[in-house]
Image (cartoon, rainbow, N blue to C red):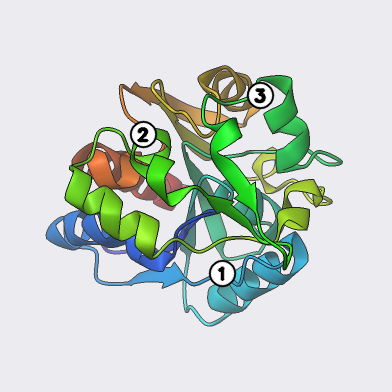
Amino acid sequence: MSNQPTIVLVHGFWGGAAHWGKVIVELAGKGYTSLRAVELPLTSLADDAERTRKMIAQQTGPVLLVGHSYGGAVITQAGDQPNVIGLVYIAAFAPDAGESPGDITQRHLPVAAPNLVPDSDGYLWLNADKFHESFCQDLPAKDALVMAATQKAPLASTFGDAITATAWRKKPSWYQISSEDRMIAPENQLKMSARLNSQKVITLAASHASLASRPAEVAALIDEAATEASKG
């Protein structure tokens, strides 16, 4: 692709940039040479969006933003930049202005909601003993063990941070629903994906961690989005 964009990958709660590892390998195999994965502080939506904007600003040429889970809220807030050509949501929040991830979660509580545990410092953890069954039930137990031990907890207050800018109203978007998701209820994913300026919506019979359990399909959607958005 002559006008190949930089793909900027944005992780969600209870994970870091390394959660994109298998997707990065798949995209590199498809010939993408400019791949970036943001490491979010997970301290507030404003902080996370600013970190993402800085990454976008460092790139020359067009950028395709990809967000997993809470990362979808981040790309929604940060994505209205001139060089952003599209947004891809992977089992992700896609809030409208005035909505927060917490608001959306309350509409249909996910199966794993009882497994979230706050600590005395205000961070919200996913119970390590319940991580496999909650976050990534379609991955091997050894992979879940590593994810649980290395999870990156957000400040609980971040759940309540509302969107003030809605990039998906201005940018073309793509959405992957995980039908077996226990962290963001599939019902909420269906409703969010239906209202986007969406070019394509796909459904995978996958856990919340579809980026790790179904990397080939996730990378194929990103590749399709990059190809289509570049034509515009």
Frontmost of labels 3 and 2 is 2
Residue at 22% across, 55% down: 22
Element type where label 2 sits in the image: helix
- Seen as rendered, the residue at the extreme bottom is 58
Location of residue 150 with respect to 69 vertically, above or below: below
> How far apart, in angstroms, are the residues tagged by discs 1 and 2?
25 Å
Between residue 137 and residue 190, name the one nearer to us. Answer: 137
Amino acid type indicated by mark 3: Arg
Residue 163 seen anywhere in this rendered image of the structure: no
User: Residue, x 24% and y 40% (percent of image)?
Assistant: 213
The residue under label 1 is 40
Is residue 110 rendered to the left or right of residue 135?
right
Name the amino acid type tagged 2.
Answer: Glu
Disc 1, SS: loop
The disc placed on residue 195 is 3
Task: Provide the residue designation for mark 2.
Answer: 133
Quote the CA–CA distance across marks 1 and 3.
26 Å
Circles 1 and 2: CB atoms closer than 8 Å: no
Q: Image point 79% across, 51% down: which residue?
A: 165
**Secondary structure of the residue carrying numbered label 3:** helix
Please name whichever residue, 196 or 214, is drawn nearer the observer in this view of the structure: 214
Q: Quadrant of residue 202?
A: top left
N-terminal-most mark, 3 or 2: 2
Instruction: Say if mark 1 contacts mark 3, CB within 8 Å.
Output: no
N-terminal of the pair, mark 1 or mark 2, is 1
